[in-house]
Amino acid sequence: MKTRAVVFRYSGLEISPDTLSAHYQLDERSFSETVTFDGVGDLTTPSGVAVAQLWYLLAGLSYYKAGAAYRVDLASTPITNAGRALVKAALLDGLGEFAFRNELNLHDVEVVGGLDSASTHYVAEDPSSLLTPFGGGIDSVVTVHSLSAALSQSLFVVSPTSGRFEPLEDTAAATKLPIVRATRTLDPALLERNPDLFNGHVPVTAMITLLAAVAAVANSNSGVAMSNEHSASVPNLTW
């Protein structure tokens, strides 16, 4: 029988011009994740840092799930009221399938800490430029071909440290659009099959979307464009 952890803590986010390094702690276990960008401007602008902090908060759920702690400590992470609402929604809704499959009730989780922060406003230098997260599937291909030719569009591709996925790369090359890249390096401990830790799905689409937003701000793009497929092979579940 797995035992839930007591505290999950956000230990800090390091931001360099092209790299995000996120640090977390689950009781006595420490985790770190690194994302390295290629083809972007400086990530350390005030707007870039603000969006990166949101990614850091959601990316932490990949490590929180290992112990499903009763308390989440945001520590000294700057956060707005909207940011707190996002974290709570990601925790309850984004980990909904995880909670169901592990028979957990995450409504009892207490979120504490965080430094109250004012909102950061961002104005794009080029209002016609967009960044499109591209996974090579139907939805991202539809996005690319549906957007106006009058827009300046670039693709955003996230790859694991194991290397690039050839079918995705072939599809991206067929668009003839410039590509902005990010490489995620997950903590190796997260990938181990540890019977004492919980496992399951996390809101990875939200995490990737926020990485795209980080890249878009660094490149002065006006936004991130995504499609959400209307159909689904599995119906919604009310628990």
Image (cartoon, helix red, strand yellow):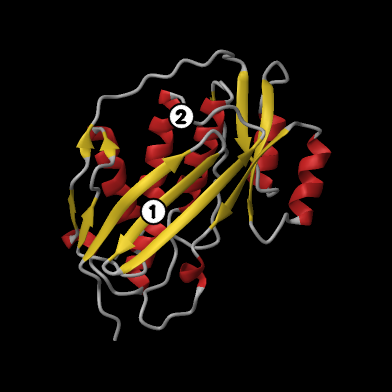
Question: x%, y% of residue 36?
Answer: 58, 45
Q: Quadrant of the C terminus?
A: bottom left
Question: x%, y% of residue 140?
Answer: 65, 42
Residue lying at the far bottom of the rendered structure: 1
Q: Which mark is residue 90?
A: none
Q: Is residue 150 left or right of residue 11?
A: right
What crowding class fits label 2: few (fewer than 14 Cα within 10 Å), some (14-19), or many (20 or more)? many
* Amino acid under disc 2: Gly
Q: Nearer the viewer, mark 1 or mark 2?
A: 1
Location of residue 147 (image quadrant): top right
The residue located at (44%, 63%) in the rendering is: 201
The residue located at (23%, 56%) in the rendering is: 72
Mark 1–mark 2 CB contact (< 8 Å): no
Q: Rounded to the nearest whole Å, what is the CA distance between mark 1 and mark 2? A: 18 Å
Residue at the disc numbered 1: 23
* Amino acid under disc 1: His
Residue at the disc numbered 2: 48
The residue located at (54%, 21%) in the rendering is: 222
